[in-house]
Image (cartoon, helix red, strand yellow):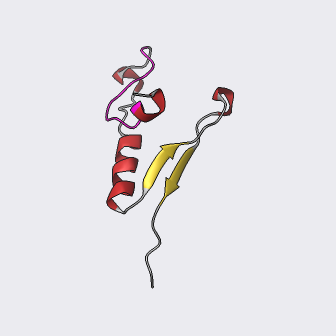
Amino acid sequence: MEQRERIFECLNRLDASRDRSTGRTGLGLAITRKIAHRHGGTVVHGHTPQEAGACFLVELAVLPG
């Protein structure tokens, strides 16, 4: 599985130097994607150079009316 998709898994840490003692639980992106999916949308990691930081694209359906 590509690293960019693994960041959406609950409690997944791609960097071995990060642990729970830093206060991060690794739930935010998993929750965000689940909410978007439940509303008929998607969340993907955009392609950016590493030094530019992270870019996430969220698409949600527009409901009529």
How far across and down, in percent of the image, does residue 41 sit?
A: 42, 58
Name of the residue lying farthest toward the top: 17
Provide residue 42's location: percent of width, then percent of height. Answer: 43, 53
Residue 27 sits in quarter = top left
How many labels sit on residues? 0
Q: Residue 19: name its quadrant.
A: top left
Q: Position of residue 46 (x, y in %)?
A: 57, 42
Q: Residue, x 40% and y 49% (percent of image)? A: 32
Q: Is 4 placed above or below 61 here? A: above
Q: Which residues are magenta?
A: 6-16
- Give the quadrant of the N terminus: top left
Q: Is residue 54 magenta?
A: no
Q: Is residue 43 above or below residue 59?
A: above
Q: Residue at x 68, y 33 (%)?
A: 52
Q: Residue furthest front?
A: 1
Residue at image coords 50%, 54%: 58
Q: Main secondary structure of the magenta part?
A: loop
Q: Residue furthest bottom?
A: 65
Q: Quadrant of the C terminus?
A: bottom left
Residue 13: x percent and y percent? Answer: 39, 24
Q: In the visual, does 56 lie left or right of 22?
A: right
**Residue 10 part of the magenta-drawn span:** yes
Q: Is residue 5 above or below residue 15?
A: below
